[in-house]
Amino acid sequence: MLLYAHTLTPRLRYITHWFAEQFLFDSIECTDSIDQYRAHTGLCINYSKERIRDTECWIQAATLLFESDIHPIQLDVQQNGTFSTFFCGRGDMGFDVFAASFYLISRYEEYLPHPSDAYGRFSHDASLAFQHGFLDRPIVDQWMQQFCLCLQSKFPELVIRPIEFTHLATYDIDESFAYQHKPVWLQAAGLLRDIILFRLAWVRERVAVWLNQRPDPYDSFEFIRSLHVNTSTRPLIFILMAEQRGQYDKNLSPQHPAQAQLIRSLSSWSDLALHPSWRSGDEPELLIKEKQHLQALIGRPIRASRQHYIRFRLPTTYRLLVEAGLQDDYSMGYGSINGFRAGTARSFFWYDLAREQVSTLCIHPFCYMEANSFYELGQGIEEAANDWTALEGQIRQYGGAMITVWHNTFLGTQARFSGWRERYANWFRGLCN
């Protein structure tokens, strides 16, 4: 397969390589020689302003992939009856599928001035996907599947990859225990707060745990292990490694014997990854220290991470992850709403727009986190389940990996999360059967 463009840029090579890798069995060779393109006898993609030959698939090229700067773009989002499009034009697709896909996957809009939410994050309501109602669909995957069909209509001999659905269950351990192993002063303060707020059920629960009459309600680790014991994949668990307690870093210090023991236990039946502390976002030198501490505890390299509270800014945070030797990141999603932040359920290497180069950091987007449903959207269990089932349906239709984020707290036994672990377990077992 040969693609012609008047100029071959890093952006164009990046998105065409990703497309070929994810959707085709063949690679795409690129050329800026129109004579070579005219003489080619195989499959042809014309990425230019005008049609060149009869036997080709023509994408009328926008300017985005030929640029090397970052600037505001006025996008006209249109509906074609099947999906939303932008960078619209003539051509066989009616829009520039490569430029539109690159815009979403590179998170171009997050490099531009934008409003931040209460946690200093890119606010989801500033995103093109949310504003135009396609955040709940992996629209890039939908576009690319349609593009494959367009190519096959021109070249029936083209073989495309079959649609495949996978599920990866991931878990964030932000707070290992509700009551156990915490300092006396902190437990006393918590008890006093519960009494003042008249949370008598919490008072009884707290005292029962202290007296060893019941397990800690956040201790759902054996429950998680039992879910995965007969599955083909190990769970991926992100452990918060904050050494100092703070407003957002509430886990036990990894130096605490109980926390260190828990981490070693988890590493025996799961793949452990780093959950960098909130504080490391303000003091970047802590990132490497926390990674090294986790590696020392489990005796093997740590290559993956997910930002605590999904707190990251481009390109700064991802550059720090690369410098720390991390190879995979699972932060690409929102900490405020569920859906497809980058428009895809497929992994991709992060493209550093400010440097115009592909990085070594592989991005694995997640589409569902139960904390978004419970805290941000105020959903009950069944409403939340309808959402994650709808997201599952989208990925089954267009292919990719459904990466879900759950917390040990929701899968525990505290009354406020009653029913969540049972509903999740039923859905999870259904996926595995």
Image (tube, grey):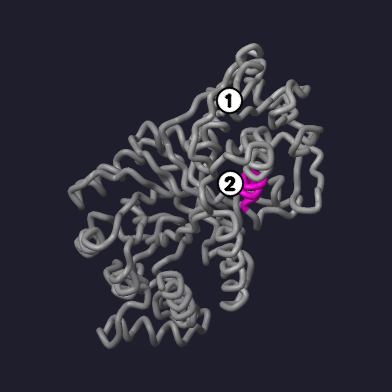
- Is 84 located above or below residue 390 in the figure? above
Determine which residue is flagged by label 2: 121
Element type at marker 2?
Answer: loop
Q: Is residue 50 left or right of residue 125?
A: right
- Nearest the viewer among 174 and 184 is 174
Name above or below for residue 134 compared with residue 284: below
**Residue drawn at x 42%, y 36% as measured from the top left:** 361
Q: Amino acid at mark 1?
A: Leu
Residue drawn where x is 60% and y is 38% of the image: 107
The verdict on residue 259 being magenta is no
The image shows residue 61 at horizontal and vertical percentages of: 72, 27
Left-right relation of 218 to 38: left
Residue 229 visible in the current orientation = yes
Residue 46 numbered tag: none
The amino acid on which the numbered mark 2 sits, given as a three-letter code, is Arg
Query: Can you say which quadrant of the picture contains the C terminus?
Result: bottom left
Reply yes or no: does residue 139 show up in magenta. yes
Look at 29% across and 71% down and name the residue there. Answer: 230
Q: Gap in Å between the C-alphas at discs 2 and 1?
A: 40 Å
- Near mark 2 (Cα within 10 A), the count class, few <14, some 14-19 or many ≥20, is some
Query: Which residues make up the magenta segment?
Result: 138-146
Taking 72 as reference, is 274 left or right? left
What x and y, as percent, mark residue 414?
43, 80
Q: Locate residue 337, reporting x and y percent.
A: 61, 59
Which of the labelled discs sits on residue 2, or is there none? Answer: 1
Return the disc, 2 or 1, that comes first in the chain's sequence: 1
